[in-house]
Image (cartoon, helix red, strand yellow):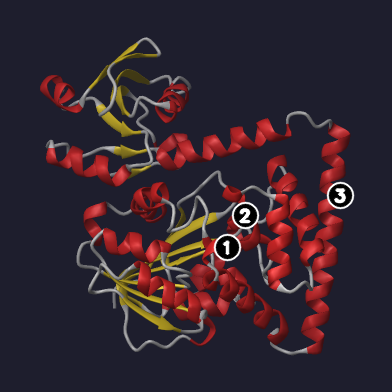
Amino acid sequence: MIHVSEPGALPQSGDVYIFGAGQAGTILHSIFENIPGARVVGFIDNHKTGEVNGLKVQDFPSFLSGWDGKAAIVIATMYVVELAEQLKAGGVKTFYNAYPLIETTLLDRGAAEVTSHLSEAERLSYRLEYLFRHMQRQEVLLRACARALGLSEPRQQTLAAFEYQWAHEAVSRGPASHYDEQFRRRAPSNVCNFTGLDPSWFKGKSVLDGGCGDGRYSHALCALGADVMSVDMSESGVKRAKENCAAFPTHRGRVANLLSLELGETFDLVWSFGVTHHTGDTERAVGNLVRHVKPGGYFTLMVYGQPRWDKFGDIYFDVRKERLMSKVLNLPLAEAEAVVNAEFDEEERQGWFDAVTPSIEDHYTTDQMEAMLRAAGLVDVINMNVGHRHMFFRGRRPEA
């Protein structure tokens, strides 16, 4: 499976079949229209037939019966794991996974639609407001640093925010949570997209989920066949991770601080999704996690990126976030939850509570993270999510 996060990684010549004839498939078709040497000749879909964009849609058995083995097959759906297994069972050895590219395209289009009504003056106002509010929040953190060396006060508050979230099921439920059936179904495909690894790679591998929260990705990793250890500083998070992964006998959970992590074992893959930037010392947390990767093993990291100045949607989102942060600053967490609930519908509440309640949240550029990961001893460091604000890095620990 060839991982595709930018158009240059797609087939650049020859005939192409797109597996998935829905919205994602039509988006991918439009991307191929800008690649002169490649030609989309049809669609494959497990649930529909007919025509899309004037091209025939076939079911998979019909496609296989006429396929000459020369045309490229490109997946255009979030259910990568299921389709990868189907393609392999059909004897297809080489195919492309373009869903990461499609997801980035959808996000950019969505942000453009949300902000299309704003004038240039309003856009400039948002940028200036973001700088002002962000500066104010950084001053709060700097004062806390001066009062307590080692960021102990903000770290305690940040831990309390996540402890509250994992201890209260109503707060931890949302469309990107373990409790959402659609998310659970696509989470294994997310793991493959973020790591660039084939679904079959995970079977029997040892994996550390560093900062597991309630175990949403621990469950996905277990579902792919890995033996998973989940660690988190939140006792409630580890408890929920154990509950959510109870169906997998090889799953383990342990309360641990990434800033002083010492597990006494190493893993084929260390996975850390959206955690290290909340520790107050991302570099130390990353270094500790990398030390737990086996020689030749992989390290994957999701970390927040700085807003991109050429993507106004980033600035627009962050101003909304800073406005809400100023409302909940210094409120007890139950009151902060009430503020979030009053402003957002049920589907958005979990994401916004998670976004605005922790005191510590560091953002990075791609160059900063690449340098940090190489300094930690990794090689083959790549951003698996080119074109997206938040970064999904994969690196490999050299063989001994």
Q: Quick check: 211 above or below 220?
A: below
Local secondary structure at mark 2: helix
Local secondary structure at mark 1: helix
Whether residue 76 is visible to the viewer of this picture, yes or no, is: yes
Q: Is residue 113 left or right of residue 283?
A: right
Report the residue marked by disc 1. 171
The three-letter code of the residue at mark 3 reads: Leu
Give the residue at x 55% y 71%. Answer: 276
The three-letter code of the residue at mark 1 reads: Val
Local secondary structure at mark 3: helix
Q: Locate the N terminus and report the quarter of the image it occupies.
A: top left
Q: Residues within 10 Å of mark 2 (few under 14, many from 20)?
A: many
Q: Nearer the viewer, mark 1 or mark 3?
A: 1
First of labels 1, 3 by sequence position:
3
Q: Position of residue 365 (x, y in %)?
A: 63, 58
Give the residue at x 81% y 62%. Answer: 327
Task: Check whether the beta carbons of the residues at disc 1 and disc 2 lie within 8 A of each other.
Answer: yes
Q: Residues within 10 Å of mark 3 (few under 14, many from 20)?
A: some
Q: Would you identify the image quadrant in which residue 241 lies?
A: bottom left
39 vs 180, nearest the viewer: 180
Give the residue at x 63% y 73%. Answer: 161
Report the residue marked by disc 3. 128
Q: Quick check: 307 above or below 5?
A: below
Q: Position of residue 291 (x, y in %)?
A: 41, 80
Q: Would you identify the image quadrant in which residue 251 lies?
A: bottom left
- In the picture, the disc for residue 400 is none
Report the residue marked by disc 2. 349
The three-letter code of the residue at mark 2 reads: Arg
